[in-house]
Amino acid sequence: MDKPLLSLIIPVYNTGEAFLALYESIQKDKYKNLEILVVDDGSTDDSLKILRAIAAKDKRLRVFSQKNQGASSARNLALKNATGKYVFFIDSDDDVLPSHFTKLTNEYEKGAGLVSCGYRYHRIYNDKSHDTYVNPPVKRKPNDTDLSFVLRQDVRDGRLYAATNKAFRNDIIKKGNIRFDTNKKFAEDTKFVLDYLATLIKNHELKISYVLEATYLYHYGTETSTVRESSLVWKNWLNSFKDFQHFAQEIGPYKFRERRLLFLLKCRFHISHAFAVARSNQKFTAKLKYTNIFKLLPAEIIVKFRK
């Protein structure tokens, strides 16, 4: 039986050279039934020229271009043109390890509604890597609703937040008319995942499968990354938390258990924000404008110990 077509969506902004390395990694995967949708988001260097040169040799690669509008807009443009059964989002300055597409697709062929994998988290500034989200996820309790089950996973760890370590069903994306919010500059992929999960729940298809291997390589701290700055602002984290509140109110039941889980999630966001500030390269006094000393000092100590 033929393997299903996969749509790989990759926004590019002045990362043509980095895309070359990613393209080589994609070539190493044994899964070959792919369409690679690359959107040049108004690059000011020779990225578009690089992309078109590759596309001239590989008919699987389709190049789109637009004025600079951000990664969300670029992904949305690619989504309109995606014809694959399953959709993967990849950042052009990241990487995938061999078998990434094969292993995630295999889980879908077993009947999953969403598939998520682990990250190989590579910090650019010290060239150190570690694997995360390779531990078993939260198990569903007998009395769990779909909402409480999702929220408990979000409280436990962050593996459901991002779009890049996942594969999505294109029919669900189309059914829910799901798009990235172009007005958001932080956690826009978390909002996309929440909208996708809401559509699964409404269609009674919530089944999340996990590949407990780090098959997606995330390069943290690249020159083109916007997360380094946006993650320092607590308001951005608070707006993302409001997306979870809206998700809970939309799905329900929104009772004491769910409110308690949301409270714990907000506490987790406070901690994550403090760590984001502590890891930044700014001086300690500059960091204090983003969070208070009682949150920053413990985070600074832990970050220093982990290094």
Image (cartoon, grey):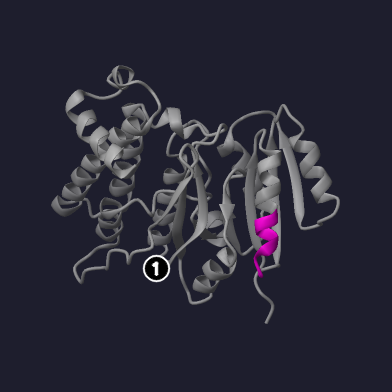
Residue 150 vs 67, above or below: the answer is: below
SS assignment at label 1: loop
- The reply to whether the magenta stretch includes residue 41 is no
Classified by dominant secondary structure, the portion drawn in magenta counts as helix
Q: For this rendering, which residue is in front, 30 or 127?
A: 127
Along the line of sight, the residue nearer the viewer: 107 or 44: 44
Q: Amino acid at mark 1?
A: Lys
Residue 286 shown left or right of residue 59 in the figure: left
Closest to the observer: 147 or 130?
Answer: 130
Is residue 89 visible to the viewer in this orientation of the structure? no
Residue 137, image quadrant: bottom left
Residue 17: horizontal and vertical position, in percent? Answer: 70, 40
Residue 160 visible, this angle: yes
Image-quadrant location for residue 7: bottom right
Percent of width and height locating residue 138: 28, 64
Q: Which of the pair 81/279 is nearer the observer?
A: 279
Q: In the rendered view of the protein, which quadrant contains the C terminus?
A: top left
- Give left or right: position of 254 versus 104: left
Residue 215: x %, y % from top left: 51, 61
What's the residue at 66%, 42% (across, down)? 18
- Residue stretch in magenta: 24-30
Residue at the bottom extreme of this rendering: 1
* Disc 1 packing (10 Å; few <14; some 14–19; many ≥20): some
Disc 1 target residue: 207
